[in-house]
Amino acid sequence: MAERGRPRGFDRTEALERAMDLFWRETYEGASLADLTGAMGIAAPSLYAAFGSKEQLFREVVEHYANTQDCGIWQTLDEVDDIRSAVEGFLLATADAYSTGETPPGCLIVLGAQHGLDDGSPARRELRERRRDNRRRLAARFDRAIAEGALPGDFPSHDAAAFYLSVQTGMSLLARDGADRACLRAVAQGAMLGWDHWIEGALGG
């Protein structure tokens, strides 16, 4: 028997995919309940029965995005041993992921909620914390490279993480404004020129 409030044959993953696409395109604030139920193919009572609220749906969508769309970007950074190659792969994977043509351009974590100083928006708080987590994750990768002797001991991990996350954020905005993959990859390569200069300076080259 179908769970009360849900349509027979309800596919949670498919519903999340459809909600993700809508939030990605329209933002949390721009996607109305009617938009969501229409995109997901369910009635409002079914949405509440399955997800509790629009806010909880958004949180689950963001987690789904991180596990299905965002994970490939971070895989190279985590798995490639050479730190320069890892950072370059991270940026090139970003360029490719933000310009597939199969999903909305750019990044849901950057574009999924309207930006502002007010912390009253649950979606804004959720995405802000996700971005902070990403910065910490990137800094931790640099710290790992320091521990392995691949970077000098005084390498500014947190500053470098802020810089490369800024590059990634800029690539998301460029993609949303219509930049193609070639443009995004050029940005990635330009950022790596900055890496080379930075490392040479740190090593006294």
Image: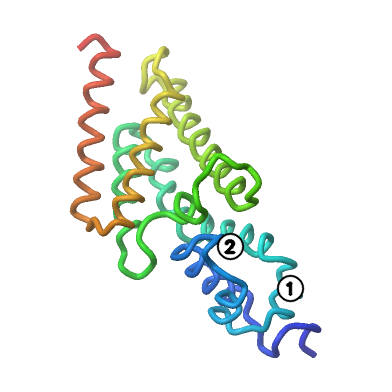
Question: What residue sits 52% from the left and 64% below the top?
Answer: 30
Task: Give residue 181's quadrant in the image.
Answer: bottom left
**Front-most of residues 25 and 133:** 25
Task: Give residue 98's quadrant in the image.
Answer: bottom left
Placement of the N terminus among the 4 image quadrants: bottom right
The image shows residue 105, relative to residue 78, as above or below, that is: below
Helix, strand or loop at label 2? It is helix
Helix, strand or loop at label 1? It is helix
Q: Badges 2 and 1: C-beta atoms under 8 Å apart?
A: no
Label 2 crowd bin: few (<14), some (14–19), many (20+), radius 10 Å: many
Task: Give residue 81's quadrant in the image.
Answer: top left
Placement of the C terminus among the 4 image quadrants: top left
In the picture, measured across the screen, residue 28 lies left or right of residue 80, that is right
In the picture, measured across the screen, residue 152 lies left or right of residue 189, that is right
Residue farthest along the top direction in this orientation: 204
**Front-most of residues 121 and 187:** 121
- The nearer-to-camera label among 2 and 1 is 1
Question: What residue sits 67% from the left and 60% below the top?
Answer: 55
Residue 160, percent from left and from top: 39, 26
Three-letter amino acid code of the residue under disc 1: Tyr
- Chain-order first, disc 2 or disc 1: 1
**Label for residue 48?**
1
Label 1 crowd bin: few (<14), some (14–19), many (20+), radius 10 Å: some
User: Mark 2 to mark 1: distance in Å?
Assistant: 14 Å
Question: What residue sits 30% from the left and 55% below the top?
Answer: 175
**Front-most of residues 46 and 12:** 46
Residue under pointer 2: 61
Question: What residue sits 56% from the left and 57% below the top?
Answer: 62
The image shows residue 14, relative to residue 143, as above or below, that is: below
